[in-house]
Image: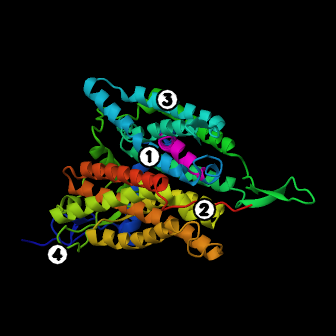
């Protein structure tokens, strides 16, 4: 067969490659060389920005921000609230239990779906929830300091009741908001998830600007020549808790308005899928989350391995249209041992991060001062979305990689638990190094655990089957067990002790 010489218009068959890999040798490619990575980045970015409406992106982000905004905002105020509430340092343990109890909202919605098949209930439920969230924040800004006598003790009943209603909105949003976003083109789910990340980031930044004023001190009051009297004085923050909650209320109201506009504006309706399908369970919801985390303008790198040896990486990419990559389809199924280990790791991580440690954080940080507690909460809350955005670009999901990250998280967790149990005299108390160390420990713990949990979810999504369902089950079981254990240890044992400077 006569061999033809390659010309400008003739595709050149690259030696050693299959026949379907063709290289077009035109003048532009030879005169203006560009790296494959840059070409891939700009091509993917151009495809993502094409045929999308910026207004819908903004509204989707604002809608997502309202998911956990109320709970995250309230949580950042704990360094100010624990000194005013009658529950004292044990206030976080009540809040953690109430948040877990609020998961009943998702159960109620699931039951109603079974009895109302074929009816679109999500828009109605979202509107009701968003209204409840706005009203709860507004009422909380005025009544968070009110108490009710129960037996011989005073309790923050109005505040805790409003915490429960806020948590009801947040927990139910997991089974409502993302399924609603499935009505729109998949690209807007990314905008929604960015907004959901802002629900932690924005309150934390606002709280850092607010400050806590300083640590409690003893101030002389009503002194006479013979008797001097002192009382505990906490320097005020830049603005009050009420002002902060009103600001969060305004943001929650803005999120509610964004949802209404998403539902009613004609330009938003045009961005809906012609035939949308709602996610039916938490399995697919978590799949949507981890799928988003695997998509990025700069094609994400994900290293996975088979479940047998935990070695060997595969470079995985997903195109702009979310079509499965050939390499993704070749990822081997996890064996039973790896599957079980991941589920146990997820349950333990959830028990610590969602249950036990938020309850004891006040005992771990407050001996070092109110400022340390303030920084640990807010910087830790910011570490959560930062860890997720890191996973947005680089994901390591092998058992060996996740175990390697779990080891330093476990070491930091031990140090945090020791500081809490030794309260009010933990290591390096009354030193700047001790204050810095406890803040860094909480930020590292939050970031590492957040990355580990989402990496496990990503691995289960790639594995297929009902992995994400059991991932969700172990998350809820671990969180509930951790919350109950923390509440019992703090309120019915003498293991953790609070402290206030004697005056």
Distance, label 3 to label 2, CA atoms, is: 42 Å
The residue labelled by disc 2 is 366
Q: Is residue 335 left or right of residue 485?
A: left
Closer-to-camera residue (321/361): 361
Residue range in magenta is 60-78
Q: Residue at x 39, y 57 (%)?
A: 296
The crowding category of the residue bearing disc 4, from other C-alpha atoms within 10 Å (few below 14, some 14 to 19, many at least 20), is few
Q: Residue at x 67, y 41 (%)?
A: 242
Closer-to-camera residue (4/481): 481
Q: Residue at x 61, y 73 (%)?
A: 429
Q: Is residue 71 magenta?
A: yes
The residue labelled by disc 4 is 16
The colour scheme of the drawn protein is rainbow
Sequence order check, earlier mark of 4 and 1: 4
Distance, label 3 to label 1, CA atoms, is: 32 Å
Is 111 located above or below residue 353 in the figure? above
Q: Is residue 230 magenta?
A: no
The residue labelled by disc 1 is 97
Q: Are marks 1 and 2 in contact (CB under 8 Å)?
A: no
Closer-to-camera residue (373/13): 373
Sequence order check, earlier mark of 3 and 4: 4
The residue labelled by disc 3 is 260
Distance, label 1 to label 2, CA atoms, is: 21 Å
Mark nearer the viewer, 3 or 2: 2
Q: Position of residue 80 (x, y in %)?
A: 64, 51
Q: Position of residue 8 (x, y in %)?
A: 29, 66
- Element carrying mark 2: helix
Sequence order check, earlier mark of 3 and 1: 1
Please state, as top left, top right, bottom left or bottom right, where the N terminus lies in the image.
Answer: bottom left
Q: Position of residue 115 (x, y in %)?
A: 26, 24
């Amino acid at each position: 067969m006569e061999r033809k010489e390659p010309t400008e218009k003739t595709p050149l068959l690259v030696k050693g490659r299959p026949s379907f890999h063709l290289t077009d040798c035109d003048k532009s490619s030879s005169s203006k060389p560009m790296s494959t990575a840059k070409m891939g980045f700009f091509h993917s970015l151009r495809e993502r920005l094409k045929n999308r409406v910026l207004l819908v992106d903004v509204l989707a982000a604002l809608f997502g921000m309202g998911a956990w905004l109320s709970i995250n905002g309230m949580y950042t105020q704990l360094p100010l609230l624990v000194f005013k509430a009658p529950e004292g340092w044990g206030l976080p343990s009540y809040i953690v239990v109430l948040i877990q109890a609020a998961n009943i909202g998702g159960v109620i919605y699931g039951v109603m779906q079974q009895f109302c098949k074929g009816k679109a209930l999500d828009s109605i439920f979202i509107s009701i929830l968003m209204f409840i969230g706005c009203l709860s924040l507004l009422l909380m800004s005025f009544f968070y300091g009110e108490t009710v006598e129960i037996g011989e003790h005073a309790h923050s009943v109005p505040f805790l009741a409003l915490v429960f209603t806020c948590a009801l909105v947040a927990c139910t949003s997991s089974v409502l908001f993302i399924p609603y976003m499935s009505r729109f083109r998949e690209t807007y789910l990314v905008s929604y998830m960015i907004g959901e990340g802002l629900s932690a980031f924005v309150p934390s930044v606002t709280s850092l600007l607010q400050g806590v004023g300083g640590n409690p001190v003893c101030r002389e009051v009503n002194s006479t020549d013979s008797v001097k009297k002192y009382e505990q004085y906490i320097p005020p923050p830049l603005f009050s808790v009420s002002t902060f909650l009103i600001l969060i209320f305004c943001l929650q109201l803005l999120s509610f308005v964004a949802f209404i506009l998403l539902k009613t504006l004609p330009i938003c309706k045009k961005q809906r899928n012609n035939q949308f399908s709602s996610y039916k369970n938490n399995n697919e919801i978590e799949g949507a989350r981890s799928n988003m985390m695997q998509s990025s303008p700069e094609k994400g790198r994900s290293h996975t391995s088979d479940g047998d040896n935990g070695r060997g990486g595969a470079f995985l990419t997903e195109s702009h249209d979310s079509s499965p990559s050939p390499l993704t389809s070749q990822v081997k199924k996890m064996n039973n041992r790896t599957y079980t280990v991941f589920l146990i790791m997820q349950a333990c991580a959830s028990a610590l991060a969602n249950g036990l440690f938020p309850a004891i954080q006040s005992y771990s940080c407050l001996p070092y001062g109110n400022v340390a507690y303030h920084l640990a909460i807010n910087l830790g809350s910011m570490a959560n979305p930062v860890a997720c955005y890191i996973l947005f670009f680089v994901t390591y999901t092998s058992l060996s990689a996740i175990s390697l990250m779990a080891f330093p998280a476990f070491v930091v967790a031990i140090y945090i638990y020791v500081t809490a149990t030794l309260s009010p005299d933990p290591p390096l108390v009354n030193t700047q190094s001790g204050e810095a160390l406890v803040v860094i420990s909480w930020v590292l713990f939050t970031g590492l655990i957040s990355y580990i949990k989402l990496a496990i979810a990503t691995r289960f999504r790639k594995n297929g089957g009902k992995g994400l369902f059991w991932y969700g089950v172990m998350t809820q079981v671990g969180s509930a067990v951790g919350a109950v254990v923390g509440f019992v240890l703090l309120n019915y044992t003498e293991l953790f002790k609070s402290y206030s400077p004697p005056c």
